Amino acid sequence: MYPFGKGMARHLPFLLLMIPTALYVLFGFGPSLVTVVFSFTDATGIPGTEWHFIGWENYRTFFTASNADDQMKAIGRSLYFAFAVVLIQNAVALFVAVLLNRKLKGDVFYRATLFLPVVLGVTVSGLIWQLMFNPMGGPVQRILKMFGTSSNFFGSYEVAFDLIIFVQIWMYMGYSMTIFLAGLQSIPRDLYEAGYIDGAKGWTAFRHITYPMIAPAVTVNMLLSIIGALQTFDIIYVLTGGKFETSTLAWNVFAAAFGSTSADYGRASAIGMIQFVFVLIFAVTAMVYFRKREVEL
């Protein structure tokens, strides 16, 4: 009846839980609540300036101002970015994980190499690809010139956004691969042996044995990549600074709050809340769908 002792000792677990709870309220829930409040104000973030409640004005401005068309395009780019990253990143990560799970010679080296971009960080990764795609004589430009063509890469309206998607996938594919690999290595070999006796080989074994067994890993990777892609702004900042039609909804939050000399915390908070709704809708929808798929498989 008293697993933690009697008297004051019974309250020790609750006292210990108060520390992380207080930290969460201070650094997690608190700032989120302040963001909600700020979205209804004209706060600028400039010390000493007054701010006032203006109701839904920031939200109306987002959808009706002269730049509303740009905001809609940013939403479209956010959805395109998320769709491309989620689909390609997880497909490539699963393919690579299946290959590495076959105990290839040097598989530890391959795993470390593929996971390295995750460790490098956004700034280092961005600088690496800026050098690779340098239009003034970078390695990729030299290859293109061998075929009689050239490109401005991150300075091009046509390819800059797609290149950012490529870099995003390159940075985080190793993370998704690790989760898939963990799921693959948890599958008992007996299942494959039993399936082989019944004639399940190659794609048939993957479809009826491998994929159902790694369904939880698929759910985790899909959720993480959806949330991460819809919240990405840092690699855009490093590579293009939001120029050349590469701005997304997440980028607009950063730009409104910190991207100019006249910061607008109220408008940035409103855009942040709109972004939160998008992330919540897509994340919950994906979670429900993939959880249902886990049960069906």
Image: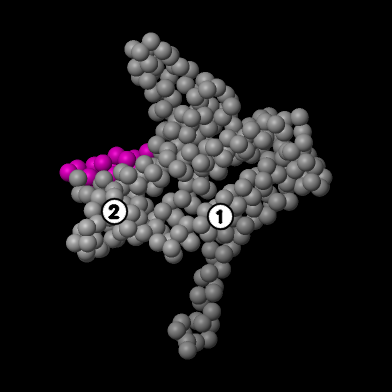
Real-space CA distance between mark 2 and mark 1, rounded to the nearest whole angstrom: 29 Å
Residue 202 against residue 113 in the figure, above or below: below
Tag nearer the camera, 2 or 1: 2
x%, y% of residue 254? 62, 37
For the view shown, which residue lies furthest in the top direction?
A: 148
Look at label 1 and name its amino acid. Thr
* Residue that appears at 80% across and 42% down: 57
Residue 217 against residue 38 in the figure, above or below: below
Which span of residues is magenta-colored?
Answer: 105-118
Tell me if mark 1 has few (under 14), some (14-19) or many (20+) residues whose alpha carbon lies within 10 angstroms of its own: few
Q: Which residue does the numbered mark 2 point to in the structure image?
A: 204
* Residue that appears at 39% across and 47% down: 176
State if disc 1 and disc 2 touch (CB < 8 Å): no
Q: Nearer the viewer, residue 42 or 292?
A: 292
* Residue that appears at 51% across and 82% down: 10
Under circle 2, the secondary element is: helix
Q: From the viewer's perspective, is 285 left or right of 191?
A: right
Query: Residue 252 in magenta?
Result: no
Query: Residue 285: which numbered mark, if any?
Result: 1
For the view shown, which residue lies furthest in the front direction?
A: 199
